[in-house]
Amino acid sequence: MDWKGCSRMTKTINFDESTLFTNFVVYLFAFIIAIGTGAIIIFAIMKINPFSAISLIFSFGLFNAFGLKATFQYMIPLALISLGLALCYKAKYFNIGADGQLIFGTIFSMQVIFSLEKTTHSPLAIPLILLSGMVGGAFYSLIPATLKAKFNISEILTTLMLNFVAIYFMTWLVDINGPWKDPTAAELESYPIPSYYYLENPAILLSIVIIAIIIVYLIDTRTILGFQIKVVGSSQKAAEYSGINRTKVYILLSIISGALAGLAGSINLLTTSHILSSDYDSVYLGYLSIFTTWLAALNPLFVIMSSLLMGVMISGGYFMASISGVSQLFVYVFEGLMFISLITFKELSGTLRRLLKYG
Amino acid sequence: MQQKIAVGLYNISKRFPTVIALDNVTIEAYVGEVHAILGENGAGKTTLMNILFGLLKPDAGYIKLYDEKVDIRSPKEAMKLGIGMVHQHFSLIPTLTVYENFKIFSSKVRVDEKKIIELAERLNLKIDPNEKVSNLSVGERQRLEVLRLLYFDFKILIFDEPTSVLTPIETANLLEEIRTIAQEGRTIFFISHKLNEVKRVSDRISVLKKGKLVTTDINERMSTEYLIKCMIDKVPILQQKSKDSNSSNVILEISNLKVRSTKGHICVNLKPPFDKIKIHENEIVGLAGVAGSGQKELFDAIAGLTKVLEGKILFKGNDITSCSVLERIRLGIGYIPEDRIYTGVAPELSLYENFMLKTLNNDKSFKKSVFLDKKKLIEIAEKLVKEYDIKAANVFVPIKTLSGGNIQKVIVAREISMKPSLLLAYEPTKGLDVGATYYIRNKLIEYSKEHGIFVFSEDLEELMSISDRLYVIHNGTIVKEFTRENFDEYKIGAAMVGLERV
Amino acid sequence: MVSSVLDFFLEIIKIGIGYTTVFLLASLGDIYAEKSGIPNLSLEGVMGMGAFLGFYFALIFQNSYMGLLGGILAGAVMGVALSYLVIDLAINQVLAGLSMWLVGMGLSDFLYTLSFSHYPYLVTAPKLPTYFVSSNLIVSVLLNHTLVDYAAFLSVPLLWFFLFKTKYGLMIIAVGEDPKAADAVGTNVRMVRYATLIFSSTMGGIAGSLIALTVGLYQVGMIAGRGWISIGIANFSGFNPAYGLLASLLFGVISALGPSFMVIGYKIPYEFLNMTPFLALIIAVMIVAKKAIFPASHGQPYKRE
């Protein structure tokens, strides 16, 4: 008897670029089912009608002024991180350290802000701050990359461990005895950044993302690095055989993705939080961006769509939680279950397609 | 005297997404018979036996054992019914010991070590039950698989291409063993594409061609010529090797090479009297050796995939011993590797991308500033597909959708089109059907007119038909060198197992 | 109060053994899973659910052992779910594990705040009782532990024996090394992997519940990365239960450094002490990196046509 489930070949990452339209349709259905699952959960826990729940989420996330702003504030960092991760995962370099890289980007930016405070504020300040964020993220990302290069340690392990280290480090910075704690603040947080560093112009933010998308897209499809990434992702042995230096590829990938994650942290600081705090709201953005990367099928062009969707889900989810008095942690449950439904359905639909094709 | 039918496969059909593997095949085998399934690669032999063994489910047809219809849904069920299989790629777990490998097989708790040793002696095999399987030679492992089936008293045995990894002497032993076992009342299926072995061992022969049964008859009644005609449509011709112009330009010279394997021991160790390997500009040099003699590591070392412990590799007079893989590709060393699917190509990438796997690192002409010139890549790919007659829908399909033969053609096409001065070929025709096999052999002969080729194959016949000279490797050392004039199958075979030393 | 350096170190070890059991249970489970070729990357989430359900059961039944049952339940259910996703649907294990982590962590914290955040006082549940209370420090270190601690330590030789000496353990190893060969000799690869994965999740559930039940509390985020460290421990110990015990002890003691130093008021910021297990794991893996041997089929799903 054949095995139940799939009868296809062994694959762990399965994105068939050749049938783009069918993929889109499958994703659409999967997404609808995922939302449906989420809505049913909302219904079960918060006693809200699933349909009104969905419409509430979307209307808040997209059409309400506060909601849209929140959506945007999630979407931008998610998109930036996802771009970097898209390249990483294509090479099967499972960098899950976006959180830690984001934190270090924020920390580096903060340091630069403190140093700049004494000088006049020039228009170059903000780009410098953003750049320092990229440096911070890239630096933190190079640690696991070098460990992999020298000792062949799994990046899954190292990036994960370093995430925790980063969170503890940041907590220390703003702890009661920490160097950056604002003594006047009641919470464990740092001095707020000066208001002239606020970056709230949506056009600028979008442009940054779009430029990033274009750069990553070009790298992916038109450069030799992009080709090498695909080969390494397809088969390490083939990469070695054709003379590709895998270590170099991993290092470049970690620099790119680390820089993007750091940039996301920087932007987050300037746009949303304006402060370094131990009650870190953006924690798990790094992990959620893994989901947006996969939702976008590792394609840089779709990242903005999946980030937008995820942004709506998050802000709408927080809204749902607040109006029904439920803990905001619910959002993570929601995201996680949605994602599981999505990939489950995608796998099942793959089986269905094959069964239909070959009877 | 009417013989009893032990196994009957009736009207078996099986199709896969891209090909019909079996088309209405009916075969019966008697008790105590050695029944050969003969056919070239891709004819459907392994598929048929996999169905008998429960690894595959037929789309149509049924199986009878001792006149009773049976439904075999898994290897476990097959084994319960007394069917055992000696696989092409063994089913022993190398990290476990002999004893442990028996244990996972058995439904009883205790495995009798003494019985294992006894049975082994009967087959002239010395076995220590507590030895790790990874320490056994390939020939020993195969005999162990047979031993295991005998220990558990299987009545129906399937041998799938068992001699492909054996030396001539080990092959002879195995064939004799098979006849002995059959006489004890077992039914044996012997799958092979090697005509002479089938003639030696079987009582009756069934010939499969492209999924259909061509004929079944008693061995003695079928001549070799007749069988060849059944197996393939037209006999391809191998180019003649021209005896003239032996260039004295040495392309490759390896001396005193020592390579360490991933397991830690020295697997290549060139020492006197054959401490040097030389390859000239327009010859094919063959390497013969039993599996695991260090030939793979030797080839990998020349290509730069393995680091060398000691010794020198000189290419066109330059010392390349510490050059990277990329540098060696650029200098002009091509490699057709053993592992077609995961090393030779990047499986998920498309056809045209795989053609350019190595070129992209080298040839600046594919770059328009920082970016790739995709149109040019596609053009070249389509040209090569036409030239080598590669069967694929277009150049954009993922290469893993192609058959093994076509994938190999892509690899050969790519390597040759890069015009390397030295082409390394490791088992270039393994598992390919006759058409593809002869095509590639001819291509190699053609290419060797102006370049050097170093080829390894476990098929001695193939080596002898295309090589100008031959080295024999045993336990990591070159033990003998033959020139075309004194090629002798048995002498070479003896050297392969270390029986003849200069 | 500490009267000597020796006493201080004994205190560390005592606290450490408390941490050890959690690492031990979770890593033993993961060792089995990894041996069969599929790492259980959902452990962090499983432990979260185990902690919550353990706390909850202990609370409503007013019995800490019922809490253990809650942990077992949480682990088993999540194990079945993960197995289906990763074995039958062949979903990428990293993704499946991460999703289950978010779901498990979110759900457990969420359910806790849903049920108890409006209570004016801190809700506590019965703790697991310890035995052999003694003022003698050495006796205390060795014997003053819960039944679960004893069981966990005793299970090490059993699990070792089962894995390396019995037919079923060998089958697990075979499936991890070469699922094709194992299939060809009649082993049901799918069943073996389901079994090991569910076993490892169940162990994770127990480990999670232990975290809550030793203190009789539940705190949001109390797992604090210990699930991931357990996976690291499983790797670091070469997937051998015997080494797993030693590694768990090591990391247990390392984790105890933080609280111990806080007790004596030594001025190292607790955050840096909290970092130590994570950094230690990276260093540990660096040391054994050269010799790391994974089961050959690690991380690859297996399908038969």
Image (spheres, coloured by chain):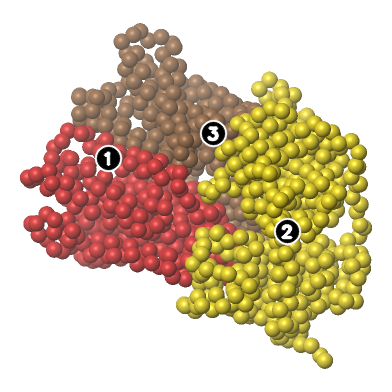
- Colour for chain B in the figure: yellow
In the image, what residue occupies the spot 20% across and 65% down?
Answer: C62
Asked if badges 3 and 2 are on one and the same chain, I answer no
Residue B165 visible in image = yes
What whole-number distance in Å separates the C-alpha atoms at marks 3 and 1? 31 Å
Find disc 2 in the rendering and name its residue: B494
Find disc 1 in the rendering and name its residue: C274
Q: Secondary structure at mark 3?
A: helix
Q: Is residue C280 above or below residue C181?
A: above
Q: Is residue C91 above or below residue C184?
A: above
Q: Can you say which quadrant of the picture contains the N terminus of chain A?
A: bottom right
Residue A25: where, in percent of width, then height?
64, 47
Pointer 3 with pointer 1, Cβ within 8 A: no
Residue A315: where, in percent of width, then height?
42, 38
Please name whichever residue, B80 or B170, is drawn nearer the observer in this view of the structure. Answer: B170
- Identity of the residue furthest to the front in this view: B502
Q: Secondary structure at mark 2?
A: helix
- Identity of the residue furthest to the top in this view: A120
Name the residue type under label 3: Thr
Find disc 3 in the rendering and name its residue: A247
Foreground: disc 3 or disc 1: 3
What whole-number distance in Å separates the C-alpha atoms at marks 2 and 1? 66 Å
Name the residue type under label 1: Asn
Residue A290: where, in percent of width, then height?
49, 41
Name the residue type under label 2: Ala
- Colour for chain C in the figure: red
Chain containing mark 2: B
Q: Can you say which quadrant of the picture contains the C terminus of chain A?
A: bottom right
